[in-house]
Amino acid sequence: MTESITKYHNMDFNYDKDDEATSNYQQHQSPTGGAPPPPPIIIRPAAAFETEAGGRQRPNAPTTKLSELSLPQKKSSILGASSNLVNSIVGAGIIGIPYALRMSGLWAGVLLLLLVAALTDKSLRLLIEQASFHPKLHHLPIHTFEDLASYPYGKFGSAFILFNMFIMAYGAMIAYLLIIKDTIPTVLGYEHGQNILERNLILVATSLFIMVPLSMQRDMASLSCTSAISVTADVILVIFIAAFSPVAETVEQYGGFGMILRNDGINNTLFIGLGILSTAMACQHSAFIVANSLENKTRSRWSWVTKQSIGLSAILCAILGICGYLGFMGQTQGDVLNNFPLGTVQADGARILLAFTMFFTYPMESFVARHVLIMLIHNGDMDAKGGCTMENESRVEEEELGDEAGVGAFNGGDDMTVSTSRSIIEGGGLLCMNRRQTWTLLVYLSTLLPALIFSDIGPVLSITGAIGGGCVSYIGPGLVYLGVNGEDFLNSVLGRLERWRGTKDVNNNSGGGGVTEEDLPVDGDASLEIDANSTSFNAYDSIVSGSKPVWYYSGLFPIWCAIANKGATHLKKKTDAAYAVTGVSAESVVVNRALLLPPPTKKDYAISLFFVCFGVVSAIAGVMSNLYVQWNNLDEVDYESEN
């Protein structure tokens, strides 16, 4: 067993080479090279525990290991997880919703908001369900978006997700700091666009003494209280916008609401609005952090979290967006509060509420950015335990002796549980800081610099949403679903093709269901059987080699089938590799099969393909639209002149 654990530790399942996932179990170094990783964190599946008399639990299955990833030590209730998720969604993006409606058009923007909300809810459930409840993956330690993407797509899948997660988090943090620079100094009497030095000094002071300490927290569950305060501030802010925005006067000035609907349907800058809406609703990059903090994670409990969070966020965004846009129409700015007059109690109160929201939301994105950097540089080991001090060395020895007892180091649950001790001092940082604090501070400084230089939040939200949001929110979940279920997808497509070939009486090389002569039993030898694995992976060859109808090409199935084949092939290699070094398979783990996902349907595949297409179009069109707007200086266009 010790040898199996060591082999599993030597494998880097997040960054394995595609052609070596099973054929060569050599040690893979961190993507940045450097020193070998610290001793592994040993984990066990929840199903690997038996309950003894008195309620104590003991392990009864081989151990596996989740790279060096440091998992949460605190758990949240459904309400706490929902608050964290809402706080992650309703950040800087919500204050830009009126500007998004201005750029996209009123009713087109509202429809896009509803579509983005529906897609966000579906993608959140899709990701966590594939990672934790898929029949082929439920026994494996998949606790991050990039982990999940690495199973069908290897190193490329991990890198794609990590890169775009960082774009989303980094852009959001800059936007939060810009909003702080817009709000707090204005309340203190420094007008927007003036007193640049004073505004920047206030930004540095407030962010350094409020945002940074909150961002230094280890687990997102520690932010449940501040998230609840932030969500409450958001609700009050929405009420303020709805109550004090000059909607009646502006609508009357534009000829009535009916005239606005007729003249303000769809604008040629539609995809800029979509980018901002994608930024506002995007939370896929923090979905795994929130889900891992959920106590007793099940499909139904996670579904409750997503539905409550997305529903409340969509309602808040719709109310604030419509009222804010109708109040100022073509004059609506990226931060709608800049449209309100200075010095009034109501406006200053709203700015203070918004500042509270930014103070408490910034740490959510900081967690994501820090996670990405620690994954890339330290292979997920945020704690760096056991380093640098004699006290650590002594405590590590005590921890190891305690773990050998085999009881008490593990807690049963719905997911993998780490044998760590809070008593061990975290190390690996610079100066007097540990690794977590060091990276938190570096992330803050990297976002502070552009926030001090720039002042317009609109382009930041739009470009971030177009690139990062399109990839993380739509393309990533769609590709992951197609890759994880690639084998079933190929068999489904092959079945449709064979029916078409049969009706057209076309001679094809599939041999029926992808079975070739070599797969059939030899005459006279009843002991030979068809290789089920070989048969399933021959489906792609049968699809490619035979005749295809028009719908196959018009539906882009050559691309989808190639992606599905890549995902299915690598998924099998990686799950086989895990089984070879641990002896644990999906079938050997005792689990209630009713809790796992049912087989995918045609509707599920259609949704995943729509995710990919929608994400590609929104990303490309969003970037092009931003270039068009900036080149033609359309940010400041007053649409009143067009009516």
Image (tube, rainbow, N blue to C red):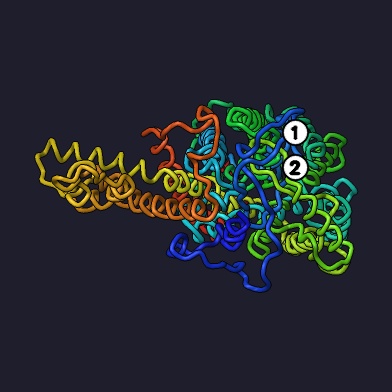
> In the displayed structure, does residue 448 sit left or right of residue 14?
right
Residue occupying the point 61% across, 49% down: 144
Q: Residues at badges 2 and 1 in contact (C-beta under 8 Å)? A: yes
Image quarter (top left, top right, bottom left or bottom right) of the C terminus: top right
> In the displayed structure, does residue 529 sit left or right of residue 487?
left
Residue occupying the point 56% across, 67% down: 28
Residue 199 placement: quadrant: bottom right
Q: Which residue is more in the foreground, 469 or 289?
A: 289
Where in the figure is residue 596, as x and y percent of width and height? 51, 32
Where in the figure is residue 579, as x and y percent of width and height? 50, 51
Where in the figure is residue 178, as x and y percent of width and height? 75, 53
Upstream in the sequence, badge 2 or badge 1?
1
Residue occupying the point 86% across, 50% down: 210
> Which amino acid type is marked by label 1?
Arg
- The disc at residue 56 is 1
* Residue bearing mark 2: 407
SS state under label 1: loop
Residue 143 at least partly seen: yes
> Which amino acid type is marked by label 2?
Val
Where in the figure is residue 519, as x and y percent of width and height? 22, 49
